[in-house]
Image (tube, helix red, strand yellow):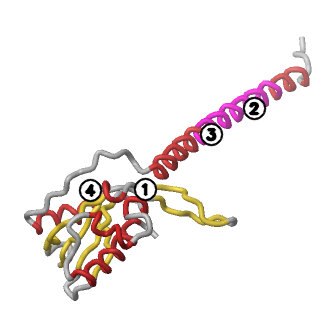
């Protein structure tokens, strides 16, 4: 489960119990064994996501009320499949993740592309998202480094292979030329 999943679940419980939405993230602490900050300690969820009190109404790209949203867009890991299972192989497109109250009073998780988020901000009018000052999430930063290393090694391997192929062709050409020079009869006088 993701931080948004846990937060959505806790917000639903809080709303059922108190009849309103939480004002701050710590209002959700009683719904977790160790508090909501501990649930998302590795991704620092309460710092990366903004909670709105009251939820902000918007009309585009869909109608609803924004309860919480990531403070900036981020890329997550796309998992590829190999014969031995799932591996994190690439980074997905940057997107915002949030919790939306739909018109039928249901809380849902929603992702927004950067273009959709721009429309949402315009349609909400009073929406102010305070960006976080955190670095990229650790597992995404690790994958990004692995991708750079893999691409660098791949480029070196291709470069070395091309060099060896050119060297092989040149040697072969020299060998063929020397065989022809020794095999041809001497010129007649």
Pointers 4 and 1 in contact (CB under 8 A)? no
Q: Is residue 51 left or right of residue 85?
A: left
The prevailing secondary structure element of the residues shown in magenta is helix
**Circle 3 — which element?**
helix
x 32%, y 65%: residue: 97
Q: Nearer the viewer, residue 46 or 2?
A: 46
- Residue marked by disc 2: 168
Foreground mark, 4 or 3, reads 4
Does label 3 or label 1 sit earlier along the sequence?
1
Residue extent of the magenta highlight: 154-175
- Residue marked by disc 1: 41
**Circle 1 — which element?**
loop
Does label 4 or label 3 sit earlier along the sequence?
4
Q: Residue furthest left?
A: 125
Pointers 4 and 2 in contact (CB under 8 A)? no
- Residue marked by disc 4: 71
């Amino acid at each position: 489960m993701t931080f948004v999943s846990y937060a959505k679940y806790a917000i639903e419980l809080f709303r059922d119990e108190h009849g309103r939405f939480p004002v701050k993230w710590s209002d959700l602490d009683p719904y977790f064994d160790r508090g909501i900050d501990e649930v998302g300690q590795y991704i620092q969820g309460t710092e990366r996501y903004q909670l709105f009190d009251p939820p902000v109404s918007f009309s585009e790209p869909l109608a609803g009320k924004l309860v919480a949203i990531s403070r900036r867009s981020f890329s997550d890991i796309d998992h590829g499949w190999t014969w031995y299972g799932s591996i994190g192989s690439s980074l997905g497109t940057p997107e915002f993740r949030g919790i939306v109250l739909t018109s039928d009073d249901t809380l849902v998780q929603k992702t927004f592309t950067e273009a959709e988020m721009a429309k949402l901000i315009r349609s909400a009018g009073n929406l102010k998202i305070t960006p976080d000052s955190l670095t990229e999430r650790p597992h995404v930063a690790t994958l990004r480094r692995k991708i750079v290393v893999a691409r660098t090694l791949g480029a070196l391997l291709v470069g070395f292979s091309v060099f060896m192929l050119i060297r092989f062709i040149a040697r072969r050409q020299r060998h063929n030329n020397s065989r022809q020079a020794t095999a041809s009869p001497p010129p007649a006088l």
